[in-house]
């Protein structure tokens, strides 16, 4: 095959049809970028944890033991059990900062910022046969009074060089932060020298230690449960007081990226289908519009194979350029998301795998080639005479019945001509419908995701509730001082019982207060869990606070609790089961009566559940529901004036979740890209149809059609398919939303309330049904304006 004539034919086709060339390049660029992003997130959503876990000899099981129940020799002997392949420990450990212990951890001095409860482990060095802790900055502890923090403790907001003060212990110990580290096992929030643990253990708290194990079989939850049973049976009774499976840690870490994958894959598939559809339409249009040129090329000696290569290449050349640019764009979109994953795993840097950058563009080019090959073969099979005779007009009689029927309607003639246009080219009208429909489906899907994620954010942060914390001036350190707050339960309010009662009366008496309830936030131990669980206890009715219910019911009395899916999974329980918690030195049996939607490992209960064990339980803050229209600033001023100068009220309301903001931003970007892609497909179809009917347009202009009427006619060519596309796209988009959203939150380890899924209202559905029309009209306006500006004489000379 002589390549030179084919190359000239390809270059000529690309330069004569610049709009179609640009459309193919842009469409493939967007589709490739979406595919690279989806493939990269899919590939990296779990592999980094597995890689880091293996490289750092992560522990399959972290077991909390009571060293008073088992000797060092007995603990060492557990490493020789048949199922155990490696063991490390015992490492002395303790938890400080729990509200019920009256021991707090503060940043700075004794009056500094209250911090979260901290699990401390004593380790002389970061390395070892299991749980090789990696230093990210600073150095390991070398002397007493030093501490190394887990990288995400307090969201990483405590830097190296900071001083932590532990109040409530003899001598008020101070710890200097000398390093930030990452444990893939999440064995502790901080590490000190082993000898320091005894000094930091809260008074009255029994000694505790950690043992770390790796097993021959720990790939499933059932296998890990079997390993726990083996250890428990091998050690003296009561030795094992808690256990943490690596599967729980993995699920949490992987979910930070896994939540992105389902909807990105959905957008990627829509983009791929759009790409194939539009490329096939462009090339088939080029073949149909170029029948005469194909006939001429054949008459001068082009073979069917050369025709096929020439017209296939007209689709492949811009597609190849689009693929290369799309890889760069996809890498750019994936980089910030993979950076978050790398931070979650503490493993440095994650990038788009090389196989993704190599495979996706090859697959896109192959897809484009197939889409271009089929219509090119049609032109290649025509004889020279048949091709020249075919011309560019649609078959005689096609669409005439539609024109006659629509002409009887009381509508302007340009409108009826435009509405009948799709019947002359039904295949092309179907492409317009599909392109606009896919774009409208993406918009419908995105609107639902956006609404659901905003509901998620409201539910997690209890948007109906304002948290009111009131401190005495004496507790703040000086008159007028404003305390900086840590998490609930971390900073005492310095209030007597009489003051608390007076404050509650003031809050209830304000006309802006719709609801109120005193709230205590404490840490408790739960049988079967290695780390404490935050319990929020309300005094008074708290059903109004806004916790979204997934199943079960709200508690109606003491001894009943609400928990999220993470708690049910971690404890292998279900709604209706009973668990035992340890608080204030007492064992309390509580029954799970409802599953709430929450991203944290928490428990919600009635005040009396805890007050029976600790009659002196004090509220940490007050949950307040304000009447509509009440500003936080005004309410705070009212409270301050009513309480007097001796008290400082602090109010906090709905915050934001960084991951949800990232999801919303990514959804918006992908939706915009797909809507633009769909509009480009419509634009290409209208350009081809306008060129084919340019002579007819000249006749219309010659008999008096104005530019505005010409634009109306051309826009009406796509109006019918656009409306039909919207009507079909809305149920498709809603179905996609109802499938993908639960999959996203499965990755986060939680179900969703039904109200978070059923988010489409009647008026919203009607508005979304017009999305196809909007996309179609947006794509048609540019070529319609070009056609309207064409002079009648120029149009009549066109063939």
Image: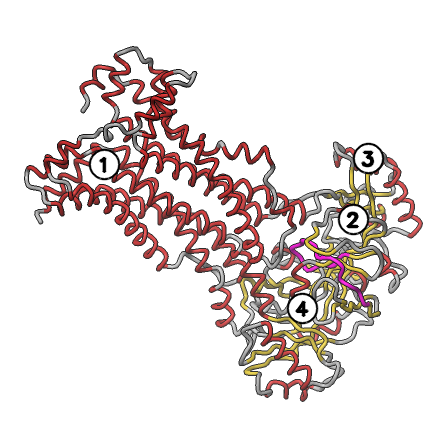
106 left or right of 756 in image: right
For marks 4 and 3, the one nearer the N-term is 3
Q: Which mark is residue 543?
A: 2
Give the x, y percent position of residue 444: 51, 40
Q: Which mark is residue 512?
A: 3
165 left or right of 478 in image: left
Q: Secondary structure at mark 1?
A: helix
Residue 599 covered by magenta stretch: yes
Disc 4 versus disc 3: nearer the observer: 4
Sort mark 4 into few (<14), some (14-19) or many (20+) by Cα contacts within 10 Å: few
For marks 3 and 1, the one nearer the N-term is 1
> Magenta segment range?
589-604
- The residue labelled by disc 1 is 286
Residue furthest to the left in view is 300
User: Most prominent secondary structure in the magenta stretch?
Assistant: strand
| Depth order, front residue of 89/663 | 663
Disc 3 versus disc 1: nearer the observer: 1
For marks 1 and 2, the one nearer the N-term is 1
Q: CA distance from mark 3 to mark 1?
A: 69 Å
Residue 468 covered by magenta stretch: no
For marks 2 and 3, the one nearer the N-term is 3
Which residue is at 30% across, 18% downward? 789
């Amino acid at each position: 095959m002589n390549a030179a004539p084919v190359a000239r034919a390809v270059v000529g086709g690309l330069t004569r049809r610049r709009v179609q060339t640009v459309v193919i390049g842009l469409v493939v660029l967007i589709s490739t970028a979406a595919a690279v992003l989806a493939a990269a997130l899919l590939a990296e959503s779990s592999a980094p944890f597995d890689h880091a876990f293996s490289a750092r000899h992560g522990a399959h099981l972290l077991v909390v033991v009571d060293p008073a129940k088992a000797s060092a020799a007995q603990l060492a002997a557990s490493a020789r059990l048949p199922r155990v392949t490696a063991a490390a420990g015992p490492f002395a450990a303790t938890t400080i900062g729990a509200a019920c212990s009256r021991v707090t951890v503060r940043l700075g001095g004794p009056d500094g910022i209250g911090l979260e409860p901290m699990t401390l482990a004593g380790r002389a060095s970061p390395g070892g046969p299991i749980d090789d802790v990696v230093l990210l900055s600073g150095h390991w502890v070398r002397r007493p009074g030093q501490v190394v923090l887990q990288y995400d403790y307090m969201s990483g907001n405590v830097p190296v060089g900071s001083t932590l003060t532990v109040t409530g212990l003899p001598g008020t110990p101070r710890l200097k932060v000398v390093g930030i580290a990452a444990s893939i096992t999440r064995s502790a929030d901080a590490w000190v020298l082993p000898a320091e643990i005894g000094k930091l253990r809260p008074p009255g708290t029994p000694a505790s230690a950690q043992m770390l194990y790796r097993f021959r079989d720990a790939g499933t939850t059932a296998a890990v449960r079997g390993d726990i049973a083996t250890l428990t049976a091998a050690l003296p009774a009561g030795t094992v007081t808690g256990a943490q499976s690596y599967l729980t840690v993995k699920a949490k870490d992987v979910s930070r990226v896994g939540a992105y994958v389902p909807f990105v894959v959905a957008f990627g598939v829509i983009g791929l289908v759009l790409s194939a559809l539009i490329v096939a339409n462009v090339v088939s249009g080029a073949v149909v519009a170029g029948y005469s040129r194909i006939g001429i090329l054949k008459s001068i000696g082009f073979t069917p194979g050369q025709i096929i290569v020439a017209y296939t290449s007209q689709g492949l050349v811009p597609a190849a350029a689009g693929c290369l640019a799309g890889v760069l764009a996809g890498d750019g979109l994936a980089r910030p998301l993979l950076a978050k994953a790398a931070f979650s795993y503490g493993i440095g840097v994650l990038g788009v795998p090389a196989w993704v950058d190599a495979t996706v563009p090859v697959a896109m080019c192959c897809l484009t080639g197939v889409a271009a090959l089929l219509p090119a073969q049609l032109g290649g099979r025509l004889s020279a005479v048949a091709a020249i005779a075919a011309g560019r007009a649609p078959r005689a009689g096609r669409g005439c019945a539609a024109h006659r029927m629509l002409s009887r309607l009381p509508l302007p003639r340009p409108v009826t001509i435009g509405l009948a246009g799709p019947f002359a080219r039904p295949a092309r009208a179907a492409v317009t419908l599909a392109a606009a429909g896919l774009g409208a489906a993406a918009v419908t899907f995105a609107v639902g995701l956006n609404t659901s994620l905003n509901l998620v954010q409201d539910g997690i942060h209890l948007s109906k509730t304002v948290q009111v914390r009131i401190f005495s001036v004496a507790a703040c350190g000086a008159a007028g001082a404003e305390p900086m707050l840590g998490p609930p339960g971390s900073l005492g309010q310095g209030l007597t019982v009489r003051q608390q009662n007076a404050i509650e009366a003031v809050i209830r008496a304000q006309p802006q207060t719709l609801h109120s309830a005193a709230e205590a936030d404490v840490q408790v131990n739960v049988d079967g869990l290695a780390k404490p669980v935050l319990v929020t206890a309300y005094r008074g009715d708290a059903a109004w606070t806004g916790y979204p219910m997934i199943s079960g019911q709200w508690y109606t009395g003491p001894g009943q609790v609400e928990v999220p899916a993470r708690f049910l999974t971690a404890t292998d329980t279900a709604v209706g089961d009973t668990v035992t918690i340890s608080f204030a030195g007492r064992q309390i049996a509580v029954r799970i009566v409802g599953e709430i939607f929450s991203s944290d490992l928490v428990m919600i209960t009635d005040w009396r559940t805890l007050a029976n064990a600790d009659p002196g339980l004090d509220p940490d803050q007050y949950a307040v529901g304000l009447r509509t229209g009440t500003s936080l600033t005004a309410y705070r001023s009212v409270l301050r004036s009513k309480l007097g100068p001796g008290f400082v009220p602090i109010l906090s309301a709905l915050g934001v979740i960084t991951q949800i903001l990232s999801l919303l931003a990514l959804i918006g970007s992908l939706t915009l890209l797909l809507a633009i892609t769909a509009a480009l497909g419509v634009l290409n179809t209208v350009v081809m149809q306008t060129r084919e009917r340019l002579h007819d347009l000249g006749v219309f202009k010659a008999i008096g059609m104005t530019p505005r009427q010409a634009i109306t006619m051309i826009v009406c060519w796509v109006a019918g398919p656009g409306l039909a596309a919207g009507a079909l796209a809305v149920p498709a988009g809603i179905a996609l939303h109802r499938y993908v959203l639960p999959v996203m939150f499965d990755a986060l380890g939680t179900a969703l309330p039904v109200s978070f899924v059923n988010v489409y209202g009647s008026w919203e559905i009607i508005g979304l049904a017009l999305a196809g029309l909007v996309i179609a009209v947006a794509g048609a306006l540019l070529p319609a304006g070009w056609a309207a500006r064409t002079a009648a004489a120029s149009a009549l000379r066109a063939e």
